[in-house]
Image (cartoon, grey):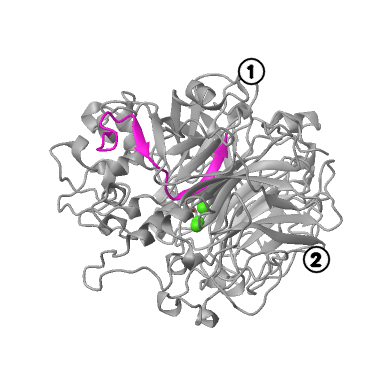
């Protein structure tokens, strides 16, 4: 079967999986998706029924047709290497600090200058999407051998970027080496990386590409939607509030049917210094910006130059056009980037709302119908959202770049989710002048609603969730999968049906189904798909995971075009699950019965102290791209020196062999985040 990555209207049949009741046994939606109808209605689900058998060794083989998971679950690993099934191979495509327009790995991390970093792969590889290219370099959704990878560089392992960690004044903690700060800034943002198969059939970064480029926290951007030009975003850089500078802490992603990339700004609030002693407005405080706050890397202290001063939110000028008091209002958005045209500036689409944005993942796209983008706001007790453009999809807009973005993404309705205890739910619109969102309540217009998205969601009574991370959509059923990574702050008094565990350390995954399978619906049904847990913890292991598939803190999630569902984890390295296994990636097939528990297999375990995040595949299903983020992240600054003479103390020194990411070895240099290429040794499709 061929995977047409963008053709969500294709009807993909999924294998049934042995049925068992979910923990809460939520009611089945009255609205079954069209695939089940085509397969003969509810028969499979009903005959297996609630109370059927539990986990089986086989994830494939219900009565349905369609793909099956053909993966032998691998064991847990604490090795400092990538572990995958023995019939697969993995190599490094590019790693932090590699040139994006030439051969990679030519400089040690600590010798790359600040300005050089702006043309190299940044740090903390995260969400990404493979855009196929044809021989002429144009977007081609069927291309398997050449493409541009749009990839987020979320954050930095600061201790490894410089000779001996960051340099700062011992007393004031002010940064004293400006080039170090420039380098840290430029290691953030987004990469557009042209890749192509060589004569041996292996993907390489294309040397001399006219497409590859970096977008950094200093790249000028256009603001669009209701917030553009409003009082909230007027700065010294853009006195009319029409532009902003750069994108930051880019975590998960989305894509559009017209061929652009959506990158999402997550933990931007912690980067700012705020010398003001006045309590900030709710547009700051609700996102964690406090008075007298020092930013996590203290970029604002590196000098008077604007590129540093902009990270200080204190009021120093006569009005907002004379300082950067509003700079933090220009972050928290979804940014649209055209992956192949470097001419126009990226666009911040303010209609999606402002939050610790995890993702903006599209629904099934159908010509003549409305569509949606699902979003998580990753903080404790934050919300799940969707944005529904007002215009229906016109397939003639494919390839339309930012013009199509202006058509679809500048007006529409932002909704927030409310989950009811009976398995139903509703999408509550966040529209100025409706419900509680009145001027009297602090929402004068839609710009104010969007800048204060969290407060608006509070006002309408949405459901406070256990840290919503990625969303993904099953290409056959349209069901939405949302990872809730953990929330150890939830008390017993605060549990609800959708977040049913107090002190939820291991997280869970929700499955949602829109009423009528309509992405624009205002009601939905939902169920808990699986609970994370170490198998060794009987009281927490509600989904009866085993040593072969236990996991915690689900984060990345990805429904591939054939129907397989991939789950990536970001649990701590010294908590219950972290002591058993490094972060990992698992695979399953969502059972066609909405309430049936999935059978999950472990496919990949990463090196020491990494997170697994970011995944995409080529349309033929034979090449998978997966990111290893921040190996060795807890290495102490004091253990890092300029000659790497202390390398034995580094928590990781992966990758040891770029041609074979599964190899461990003698530690001999700094660990790097990296994009892996995974394929099956026999050249077949992955996972089936
Ligand atoms: Fe960047 Fe919520 O993970
Ligand atoms: Ca994440
Ligand atoms: Ca995470
Ligand atoms: Ca991360």
In the rendered view, tell whether residue 434 sits above or below residue 330: above
Compared across the picture, whether 679 is left or right of 574 comes to right
Range of magenta residues: 234-255
Residue at 74 percent across and 59 percent down: it is 55
Quadrant placement of the N terminus: top right
Compared across the picture, whether 654 is left or right of 154 comes to right
According to the picture, the residue beneath numbered tag 1 turns out to be 396
In the rendered view, tell whether residue 406 sits above or below residue 337: above
Residue 349 screen position, x and y as percent:
43, 32
First of labels 2, 1 by sequence position? 2
Q: Quadrant of residue 341?
A: top right
In the rendered view, tell whether residue 632 sits above or below residue 87: below
Pick the front one: 4 or 402: 402
Viewer can see residue 51: no
According to the picture, the residue beneath numbered tag 2 turns out to be 86
Residue 287 screen position, x and y as percent:
33, 48
Q: Residue furthest front?
A: 208
Q: How many marks?
A: 2
Residue 515 screen position, x and y as percent:
59, 29
Compared across the picture, whether 419 is left or right of 662 comes to left
Q: Does dot 2 land on a helix, a strand or a loop?
A: loop
Residue 45 screen position, x and y as percent:
75, 41
Q: Does dot 1 land on a helix, a strand or a loop?
A: helix
Residue at 69 percent across and 65 percent down: it is 661
Residue at 44 percent across and 52 percent down: it is 186
């Amino acid at each position: 079967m061929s995977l047409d990555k963008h053709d969500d209207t294709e009807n993909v049949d999924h294998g049934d999986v042995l049925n068992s009741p979910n923990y809460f046994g939520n009611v089945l939606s009255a609205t079954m998706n069209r695939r089940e109808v085509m397969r003969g209605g509810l028969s499979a689900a009903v005959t297996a029924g609630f109370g059927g058998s539990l986990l089986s060794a086989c994830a494939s083989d219900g009565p349905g047709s369609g793909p099956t998971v053909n993966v032998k679950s691998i064991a847990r690993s604490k090795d400092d290497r990538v572990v995958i099934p023995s019939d697969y191979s993995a190599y490094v495509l590019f790693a932090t600090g590699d040139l994006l327009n030439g051969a990679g790995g030519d400089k040690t991390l600590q010798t790359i200058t600040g300005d050089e970093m702006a043309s190299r792969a940044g740090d903390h590889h995260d969400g990404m999407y493979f855009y196929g290219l044809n021989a002429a370099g144009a977007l081609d959704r069927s291309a398997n051998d050449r493409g541009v990878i749009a990839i987020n560089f979320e954050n930095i392992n600061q201790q490894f970027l410089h000779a001996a960690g960051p340099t700062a004044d011992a007393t004031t903690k002010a940064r004293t080496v400006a080039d170090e700060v420039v380098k840290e800034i430029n290691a953030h943002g987004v990469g557009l990386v042209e890749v192509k198969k060589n004569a041996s059939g292996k993907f390489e970064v294309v040397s001399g590409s006219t497409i590859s480029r970096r977008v950094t926290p200093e790249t000028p951007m256009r603001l669009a939607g209701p917030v553009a030009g409003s009082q909230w975003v007027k700065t010294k850089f853009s006195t009319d509030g029409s532009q902003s500078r750069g994108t930051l802490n880019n975590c998960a992603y989305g894509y559009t049917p017209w061929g652009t990339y959506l990158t999402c700004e997550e933990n931007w609030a912690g980067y700012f210094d705020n010398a003001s002693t006045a309590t900030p407005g709710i547009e700051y405080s609700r996102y964690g910006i406090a008075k007298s706050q020092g930013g996590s890397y203290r970029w604002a202290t590196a000098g008077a130059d604007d590129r540093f001063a902009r990270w200080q939110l204190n009021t120093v000028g006569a009005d907002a056009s004379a300082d950067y008091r509003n700079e933090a209002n220009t972050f928290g958005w979804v940014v649209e980037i055209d992956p192949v045209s470097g001419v126009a500036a990226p666009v911040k689409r303010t209609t999606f709302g402002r939050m610790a944005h995890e993702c903006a993942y599209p629904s099934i796209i159908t010509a003549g119908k409305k569509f949606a983008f699902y979003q998580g706001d990753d903080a404790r007790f934050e919300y799940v959202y969707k944005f529904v453009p007002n215009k229906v999809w016109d397939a003639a807009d494919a390839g339309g770049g930012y013009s199509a973005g202006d058509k679809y993404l500048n007006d529409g309705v932002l909704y927030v989710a409310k989950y009811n205890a009976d398995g139903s739910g509703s999408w509550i619109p966040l529209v100025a002048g409706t419900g509680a969102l009145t001027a009297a309540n602090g929402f004068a217009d839609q710009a104010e609603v969007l800048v204060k998205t969290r407060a608006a969601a509070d006002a309408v009574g949405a459901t406070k969730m256990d840290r919503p991370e990625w969303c993904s959509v099953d290409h056959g059923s349209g069901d939405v999968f949302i990872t809730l990574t953990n929330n150890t702050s939830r008390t017993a008094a605060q549990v609800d049906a959708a977040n049913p565990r107090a002190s939820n350390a291991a997280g869970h995954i929700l499955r949602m189904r829109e009423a009528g399978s309509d992405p624009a619906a205002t009601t939905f049904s939902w169920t808990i798909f699986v609970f994370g847990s170490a198998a060794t913890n009987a009281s927490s292991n509600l989904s009866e995971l085993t040593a072969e598939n236990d996991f915690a803190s689900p984060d990345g999630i990805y429904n591939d075009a054939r129907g397989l569902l991939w789950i990536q984890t970001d649990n701590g390295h010294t908590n219950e699950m972290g002591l058993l296994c490094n972060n990992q990636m698992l695979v399953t097939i969502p059972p066609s019965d909405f309430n049936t528990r999935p059978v999950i297999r472990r496919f990949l375990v990463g090196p020491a102290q990494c997170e697994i995040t970011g995944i995409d595949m080529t349309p033929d299903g034979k090449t998978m791209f997966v990111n290893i983020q921040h190996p060795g992240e807890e290495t102490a600054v004091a253990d890092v020196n300029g000659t790497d003479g202390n390398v034995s103390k580094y928590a990781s020194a992966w990758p040891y062999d770029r041609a074979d990411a599964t190899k461990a070895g003698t530690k001999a240099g700094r660990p790097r985040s990296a994009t892996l290429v995974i394929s099956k040794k026999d050249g077949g499709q992955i996972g089936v």
